[in-house]
Amino acid sequence: MTERFSFRLSTTDGKARRGEITMPRGTVRTPAFMPVGTAGTVKAMYLDQVRELGADIILGNVYHLMLRPGAERVARLGGLHEFARWPHPILTDSGGFQVMSLAALRKLDEKGVTFRSHVDGSVHALTPERSIEIQGLLDSDIQMQLDECIRLPAERAEIERAMELSLRWAERCKIAFGEQPGKAMFGIVQGGTEIDLRQRSAAGLSAMDLKGYAVGGLAVGEPQDVMLTTLDETLPVLPQDKPRYLMGVGTPDDIIQSVARGIDMFDCVMPTRAGRHGLAYTRRGKINLKNARHAEDHRPLDEESGCPAARDYSRAYLHHLVRSDESLGGMLLTWNNLAYYQQLMAGIRAAIEAGRYSDFMAETSEAWAKGDLPPLG
């Protein structure tokens, strides 16, 4: 085991990158998908299951964990790894997006943001320094800077103001983080879909010589082609020898397209949220188990999958669970979805290593386009 944080690129295929992030708690194979464990749990899953599916790292969140059970309490209980029984790497998001989307009566200034909890209305202050302090109390391995997330569409002047503030907050986070052997702090590129602002943000963060860089504020409703164009114009400004993380993305197609542009890390609530609402992701595309066509279909979701949820349960049974609002339905479909996402990432890594990533993208997209198998009878 290493005592350092490092990133090594082993293979490239076009702009697609195959690498490894190495930390004291383990190695993350990239491109990687990080299951979202917002409050110390990946919803509807045992973390042992998440590991067995192939996840090297999960994500936690400052906003939710600071509200309950509280960062100081988690620290007293041994840190988030021991608290949640996940001894492998954890990345924590700084809480900026959740403050924007969940908190009531938010007040933001140069110092930080003051907000009322969506849980009980209590007042909290979150500064760049406090966000890093909380992430230290949680003992996370990769810590994200606090940034200001704004809702799009927005006026250019507002996007620029938030981007510049986020740069200043990144400097403060870097100072607060200091030297933590084996750990890393990532900056977050902001700037909406304004290409010149994105490039200024990326250049400013690159000058700070951080250990990794994220692209935030995308996949918030803009068309996919706009997101991809933004990546095309932003990523070349970031260092080639540091990991790149696209926050909150996304669909399987978003992932394969973003890998082709040089993204190394992803997270998204989509596979778990979709599972709880009756939607399955498979190599044949999406399958809505609420649909009556599945009511008497004895076939599994995917007879070739290595995941028991996909291979061993009939569509009829899954349909029954979903329509009956049984918890097991959400559990099984979440299991299937996370398994598919990890299978997709394994296929991506293998294709890059083999120098056939373009072919892999075409084959995968073609399989999705064919759609699910027709109903029996």
Image: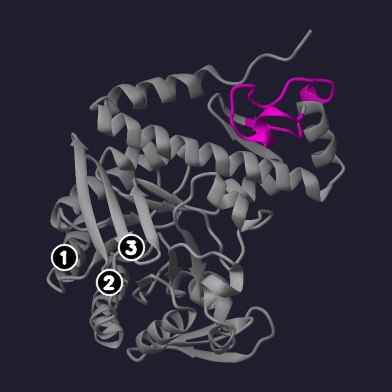
Query: Does any portion of residue 193 appear in the rendered image?
Result: no
Give, as a single range, the part of the protein colored magenta: 287-313
The answer to whether residue 225 is left or right of residue 208 is right
| Residue shown at the point (38%, 82%) measured from the top left | 132
Name the mark nearer the viewer: 3 or 1.
3
Residue 355 vs residue 269, the one in the foreground: 355
Say which label, 3 or 1, has the lower sequence index. Answer: 3
Name the quadrant of the C terminus.
Answer: top right
| 237 w.r.t. 373: above or below | below
| Residue at which label 2 appears | 163
The answer to whether residue 217 is left or right of residue 288 is left
Q: Is residue 253 magenta?
A: no
- Give the SS element for disc 3: loop
- Prevailing SS of the magenta stretch: loop
Q: Quadrant of residue 267?
A: bottom left
Q: Is residue 306 magenta?
A: yes
The Cα–Cα distance between marks 1 and 2, rounded to whole angstroms, is 9 Å
Say which label, 1 or 2, has the lower sequence index. Answer: 2
Which amino acid lies under the numbered mark 3 shown in the image of this protein?
Met
Q: Quadrant of residue 362?
A: top left
> How many numbered marks have been drawn onto this rendered protein structure?
3
- Give the SS element for disc 1: helix
| Residue at which label 3 appears | 1
| 318 w.r.t. 167: above or below | above
Residue 111 locus on image (x, y percent): 35, 91
Assess whether mark 1 and mark 3 are in contact (beta carbons under 8 angstroms). Answer: no
